[in-house]
Image (cartoon, rainbow, N blue to C red):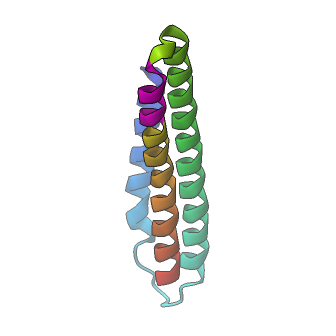
Amino acid sequence: MRKLQILFTMLSVLFLAAPAFAQEAGGGNGMAIGLTSIAAGIGMGLAAGLCGLGQGRATASATEALARNPGARPGILLLLTLGLAFIESLSLFTLVIIFVKVQSH
């Protein structure tokens, strides 16, 4: 419970800090490009790390299910493959969104 509280506090601080960098007074965008690159790196790191954790948990659960009931192997492997593809697509969608955002700046 404490970890979730810390996570939501950190996310709220990040979302509240975004309006501070919304407008530039001088008209140059040197700092915006730097912040966009940092945000892109953090975003892709989070997406890849959390997708890796999800894939590890899914694989562990599938392994436990196979150990308990080896006769259900085809169904478990089908659902495992489908689930891993969906999890991996989340990181690929994040990568595409980051490329679009970085190109727009």
Q: Is 13 placed above or below 77 here?
A: below
Q: Is residue 42 magenta?
A: no
For image coordinates 55% across by 62% down, the residue present is 39
Q: Is residue 19 above or below residue 31?
A: above
10 in relation to 29, above or below: above
Tell me the quarter of the image containing the N terminus: top left
Quarter where residue 30 is shown: bottom right
Specify the farthest residue to the top.
Answer: 68
Residue 25 in the image: x percent, y percent?
45, 84
Report the span colored magenta: 72-80
Which is nearer the eye, 31 or 97?
97
- Residue 75 on the magenta span: yes
Q: Is residue 22 visible?
A: yes
The residue at the point 40 percent across, 37 percent down is: 8
Q: Name the residue located 47 percent from the left edge and 15 percent from the top edge.
A: 71
Please provide percent x and percent y for residue 101. 47, 74
Q: Nearer the viewer, residue 18 or 71?
A: 71
Residue at 45% x, 27% y is: 76
Q: Is residue 105 visible?
A: no
Q: Position of residue 89 (x, y in %)?
A: 46, 54
